[in-house]
């Protein structure tokens, strides 16, 4: 088993960043952000092949597209901690004229952000287009994307999923955050989607399951398996089972923290559960 302590320490710091960002402006989406902290840290610090610096073309490197853009706090923290922009810019989250808007945007030129997202259901289509562009450019790097499970209730996803397999987009790894919750409750109560593994396989995708999506070693192993399945004529779906609000006891096992910020007392409790590892901004 690889030594993941440095990634675990960074994950704790990312959790602190998420909590402090949404608390400061009393706005944002901590639940899904916390649930995906391990995934983002592993993706940007171990899994993806990234260039030094940033440009919108992304030629000669792996690309990532966040479809469920409301979990921007984890995205911004991960990008800042990976050196895309200064960590202290996290202080500007959701403020007027900030580059760190509630949903990622491109008009302010924030390094690391290639598309505006948050209008759910669109990220799969964009990721497929980027993957096709890499093939046209004879660029052998991969395209990664992340989607919410509730987001798959949007029909555009399934058109894109059908297209990707029909066109043999086999340089794409699309991960679905399976936390079973969305803003109005459990996904099974809002609009049950049944067996997603069977659905993706029926659309002729290769599916990899990561049952412990809040365990960095499990994520590294599962994503390595997913990468090994690329280049074989089929797109790859990773079903990542996570816990919304992971790492903060009172935010777990409920959809209540999908889009609610902690108050002062709750912030203190949450930070106490996640002691500082790398330094706050």
Image (cartoon, grey):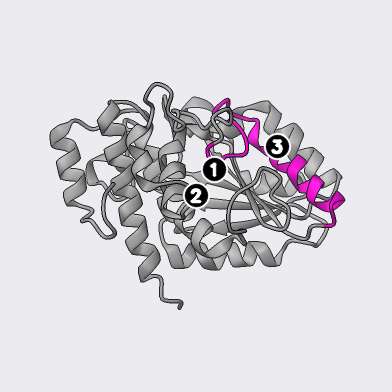
Q: How many marks?
A: 3
234 part of magenta stretch: no
Mark earlier in primary sequence (1, 2)? 2
Residue hosting label 1: 111
Mark earlier in primary sequence (3, 2)? 2
Q: Nearer the viewer, mark 3 or mark 1?
A: 1
111 part of magenta stretch: yes
What kind of element bears circle 2?
loop
Name the residue rendered at 80%, 46% in the picture.
Answer: 133
In-front residue for pair 151/87 = 87
Q: Are marks 1 and 2 in contact (CB under 8 Å)?
A: yes
Name the residue rendered at 51%, 45% in the picture.
Answer: 177
Compared across the picture, whether 51 is left or right of 129 comes to left
Q: Residues within 10 Å of mark 2 (few under 14, many from 20)?
A: some
Residues in magenta?
110-138
What kind of element bears circle 3?
helix
Residue hosting label 3: 126
Residue 84 numbered tag: 2
What kind of element bears circle 1?
loop
Which image quadrant: the N terminus?
A: bottom left
Compared across the picture, whether 136 is left or right of 103 comes to right
Name the residue rendered at 54%, 43% in the picture.
Answer: 111
Q: Position of residue 96 (x, y in %)?
A: 39, 21
């Amino acid at each position: 088993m690889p030594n993941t302590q440095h990634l675990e320490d960074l994950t704790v710091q990312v959790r602190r960043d998420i909590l402090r960002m949404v608390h400061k402006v009393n706005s944002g989406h901590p639940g899904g952000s916390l649930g995906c902290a391990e995934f983002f840290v592993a993706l940007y610090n171990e899994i993806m092949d990234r260039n030094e610096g940033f440009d919108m073309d992304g030629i000669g490197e792996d690309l990532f597209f966040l479809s469920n853009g409301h979990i921007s706090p984890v995205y911004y923290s991960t990008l800042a901690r990976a050196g895309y922009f200064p960590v202290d810019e996290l202080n500007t989250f959701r403020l007027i004229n900030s580059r760190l808007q509630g949903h990622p945007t491109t008009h302010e030129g924030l390094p690391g952000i290639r598309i505006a997202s948050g209008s759910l259901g669109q990220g799969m289509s964009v990721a497929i287009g980027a993957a096709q562009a890499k093939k046209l450019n004879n660029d052998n790097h991969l395209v990664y994307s992340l989607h919410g499970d509730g987001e798959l209730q949007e029909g555009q996803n399934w058109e894109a999923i059908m297209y990707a397999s029909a066109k043999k987009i086999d340089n794409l790894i699309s991960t679905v955050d399976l936390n079973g919750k969305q803003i109005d409750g459990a996904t099974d109560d809002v609009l049950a989607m049944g067996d997603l593994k069977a659905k993706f396989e029926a659309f002729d995708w290769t599916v990899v399951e990561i049952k412990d999506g809040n365990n960095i070693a499990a994520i590294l192993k599962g994503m390595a398996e997913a990468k090994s399945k690329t280049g074989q004529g089929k797109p790859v779906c990773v079903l990542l089972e996570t816990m919304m609000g992971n790492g903060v006891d009172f935010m777990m096992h409920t959809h209540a923290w999908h889009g609610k910020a902690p108050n002062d007392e709750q912030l203190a409790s949450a930070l106490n559960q996640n002691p500082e590892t790398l330094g706050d901004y």
